[in-house]
Amino acid sequence: MSVAVRVIPCLDVKDGRVVKGVNFTGLRDAGDPVELARRYDAQGADEITFLDVSASREGRATMLEVVAAAAEQVFVPLTVGGGVRGVEDVDALLRAGADKVGVNTAAIARPGLLSEVAERFGEQVLVLSLDARRCPPGVSTPSGYEVTTHGGTRSTGVDALEWARRAADLGAGEILLNSMDADGVTGGFDLDMLDAVRERVRVPLIASGGAGRAEDFAAAADHGADAVLAASVFHYGTLTVADAKEALRRAGHPVRTAPAAPAARLDPALAARLKRDAAGLVAAVVQQYDSGEVLMVGWMDDEALRRTLTQGRVTFWSRSRREYWRKGDTSGHRQYVRSVALDCDGDALLVRVDQVGAACHTGARSCFAAGGDLGAVVGRRSAS
């Protein structure tokens, strides 16, 4: 099964408000970040990205508050970038509710930061935020593209394509490729730049900068983007997330359908069919929504199931610790609920999720991948 192309609204945050301009200049107010995040969650966004475009000390404190508030109200993964200088900043953002963290300027100054973040938190947490442009007069790189920093205001002379390759080698789990030439112009993504980076890296690639029509999203996917990100067209009502997904679908690219809103309570008719064990627990099999991969098995009682349905995040009952635990609150490897189903006998639940990072405590994607095969019996026939 092909992996669905993700549609990601981007919220540039300055002093607690969403702003947007052209080529990172002429910023104007676009609304409250948490309210916009809730809107995009309801529209079926696959992820939401927050970028702190001021990244001052005050801005960092404000951003942590924004992330914490959004994490309580939306049910899709959050990526946060801007002003990240060390692993401590990453840790603070993850604790506030971020699922992934974008790094740009600090990694140019000290590339080893990428490895430090990847080793401590896992590659799935680390996003290289790559603000690139065609070299202006007086700047020359082998590819003709250079990296910029500080929100696109400073030239580095670093070759953008070589930096993308190196960052992936150092542990970047995906690359957010933002064309500074196309940013906010709404003339379409920079497909030439996208092609050039796609040829050099195998990690997931997010196309950013330039979306103006629904067809632009499909064009970026045609050129190798695993996800498409936009801001202005969503903020000002030109397009919705559904418009982008429909264009992708028409072009033959798989997309995720919007999940239903989390239920307020467990349907009494279904609750009556649950067959709990002597401790009041039922087994919950967790499955990746788009691929069908079985990730893990946990245990739920009625309260854990209620929290799972109302919060949109998987909560289990720990038989050893005798307490509730919400997957990912300490590891960052969160599970966002897409659906919950009861099996025919009523003694097991199937919880379909969007998994962020590893499901297993060993660091493996699936607990069954880490367990090992007991043996195969495929094709064996009876001698009788």
Image (cartoon, helix red, strand yellow):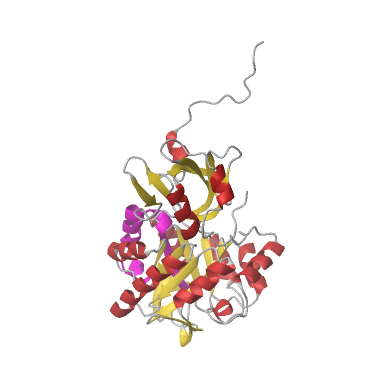
Judge from the rendering whether residue 277 lies leftward or rightward of residue 93; answer left or right.
Answer: right
Count of labels shown?
0
- Is residue 229 or residue 201 the one in the foreground? 229
Tell me: residue 344, above or below residue 148.
Answer: above
- Is residue 71 or residue 172 the one in the foreground? 71
Main SS, magenta region, reads: helix
Point 54% across, 61% down: residue: 198
- Is residue 341 or residue 134 the one in the foreground? 341
Judge from the rendering whether residue 172 lies leftward or rightward of residue 235; answer left or right.
Answer: left
Residue 331: % across, % down: 36, 53
- Is residue 79 or residue 62 the one in the foreground? 62
Residue 306: % across, % down: 47, 54
Q: Magenta includes 130?
A: yes
Judge from the rendering whether residue 305 lies leftward or rightward of residue 363; answer left or right.
Answer: right
Quadrant where the C terminus is found in the figure: top right
Q: Magenta includes 313?
A: no
Looking at the image, the residue that sits furthest to the top is: 384
Query: Could one spot residue 64 in this view of the protein?
Result: yes
Looking at the image, the residue that sits furthest to the right is: 250
Residue 170: % across, % down: 38, 56
Query: Could one spot residue 356 in this view of the protein?
Result: no
Residue 376: % across, % down: 55, 26
Point 40% across, 54% down: residue: 123
Point 64% across, 63% down: residue: 222
The magenta span reads: 104-132
Tell me: residue 24, above or below residue 339.
Answer: below
Tell me: residue 276, above or below residue 12.
Answer: above
